[in-house]
Image (spheres, rainbow, N blue to C red):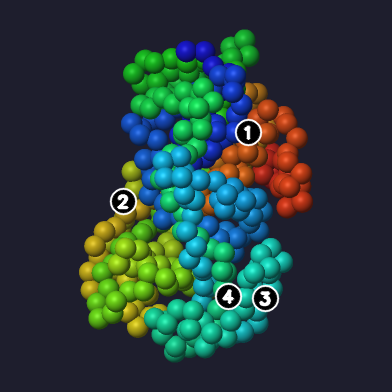
Amino acid sequence: MDVDIAIIGAGIAGASMAAFLPDGMRVALLEAEHQPGYHSTGRSAAFYTETYGGPEVQPLTTASKRWYFSTKSHSTDALMVAKRGALHVAWSQKPGALKGFAKEMQHLAPSVMLLSSDETRRRCPVLNGEALTGGVWDPDCCDIDVAEVHSYFLRECRHRGHSVATGFDVQSARRGNGVWHLQSSKGDSLTAALVVNAAGAWADQIAAIFGVSPLGLTPMRRTIALFEVSGAVLDERLPLCLDFDERFYFKPQSGQLLVSPADETHSPPCDVQPDVEDIALAGYRVEQATRLTLPRCAARWAGLRTFAPDRSPVYGFDQDVPGFFWCAGQGGFGIQTAPAAGELAACLLQDKALPDAFGRLGITAERYAPRRFALAA
C-alpha cells in the first residue's frame, strides 16, 4: 500500500488529526491493537473544563470549546458533552492561593467564580465542612462521551477516504528516495511520504524504530474506580469535585461515585492495570473529604497519560529526521483538546496557516514544536 501520510496510532491524537486532513490525500491510520483507542483513549473518564490542565493546555481546550458545544454525534444526533460544572475545592489553604487561582482562571474563562466555604458546600452538599477554605466554580465544565467523540473522528476519517488499519504494529522502518518503508510483525508493508508519530505512551519507542531521537516522554498511570455509596442517595447533579492539591477528584456516575486518586505513577508503555493500594487511597481520601461512605469498589481500571519533559504537548516535524512528524505528549488532556489539537497538527503537517482564532489564543507552531527541547538544552 502506498500512501501520502501514515499516522501511527488510532487513539484520539491520531484519529482527530486524520479527520482534519483533506479528501484526496492518501492517509493510512495504523493501529497496533485490534481496535482503535484500546489503551488511553478507551479508558479515559474525560471531562471538558478550561480550568484543568495548566497554561499550555488551556489554549487548546478553549479553542475546542466551540466544536464541543456545536458538534453532534453521528449516531445519536446529540451533543457529545453534558453540562456538569466543576468545583475546585481547597482544604486548610491560605485564601490567597485560592484567590490567585481564581483570578488566573477568570482571565481565561470569565464565568469562573471564587466561592466562600459556605457557597462551596451549597454547590456540593456532600463535602465535609471541616477545614474547608472555599472553592473555585467553573460552570461550563462538561462530561464528555469519549466513545462518541473518538467514533466521530474515526468516521470523519473514513468519510474523507482515509483508511484505518488495525493490527498493524510497525516493527521496522527505513527511508529511501524520500519515502518511508514500513513493515509490521506480520510482514505487512506500506510506503509513505510522511509519517506521523501519534503512538501515545509508545511514541519514543516508535521514534527509535525510525532512527529519531526520543523526546523523553514519560507515561504515567492514572487510576479510576467506581464506588458504591452507602447511607445516601447520590445526586447525579453533583459537580465534578477536584481537590486543589490534586490528591483526588470525584463525580457521580449512574448511581455510583467515580473516583480517582489523581495518581501519576511512572510506568513503562504497557496494558496498564490499576494498583489495589491506589484504589484504597482514592476511597479513603474521598471519605475524609465528604460525608459519604464508600463500602465497595464496583469497578476499576487504569490508563496511561504521557507527558513531554515540560508537560506541554508536542506537534511538529522532527528537526533532524525529514518526513517524521510528532503528535504526542498530550498528557491526560487529549480528549478535551482533541478538536483544536487535531486541526493544529493537520495544519502544521500541510504547512498551512493556522486559523485566526488560534493566534488570538496564543496557539502557535513554535509553542508546541519538538525543537523547543533542543533550544532549551
- Observer-side mark, 2 or 4, equals 4
Q: Residue at x 50, y 62 (%)?
A: 83
Between disc 1 and disc 3, whose residue precedes? 3
Q: Which mark is residue 100?
A: 3
- Observer-side mark, 1 or 2, equals 1
Q: Please tell me which residue lies in front, 64 or 77.
A: 77
Rate crowding at label 3 as few (under 14), some (14 to 19) or many (20 or more) other CA atoms within 10 Å. Answer: few
Q: Which mark is residue 273?
A: 2
Q: Position of residue 70 (x, y in %)?
A: 57, 49
Quadrant of the frame with the C terminus = top right
Secondary structure under the numbered disc 1 in the rendered image = helix
Secondary structure under the numbered disc 3 in the rendered image = helix
Task: Specify the farthest residue to the top.
Answer: 177
Rate crowding at label 4 as few (under 14), some (14 to 19) or many (20 or more) other CA atoms within 10 Å. Answer: many
Q: Which mark is residue 136?
A: 4
Between disc 1 and disc 4, whose residue precedes? 4
Residue assigned mark 1: 346
Q: Amino acid at mark 3?
A: Gly
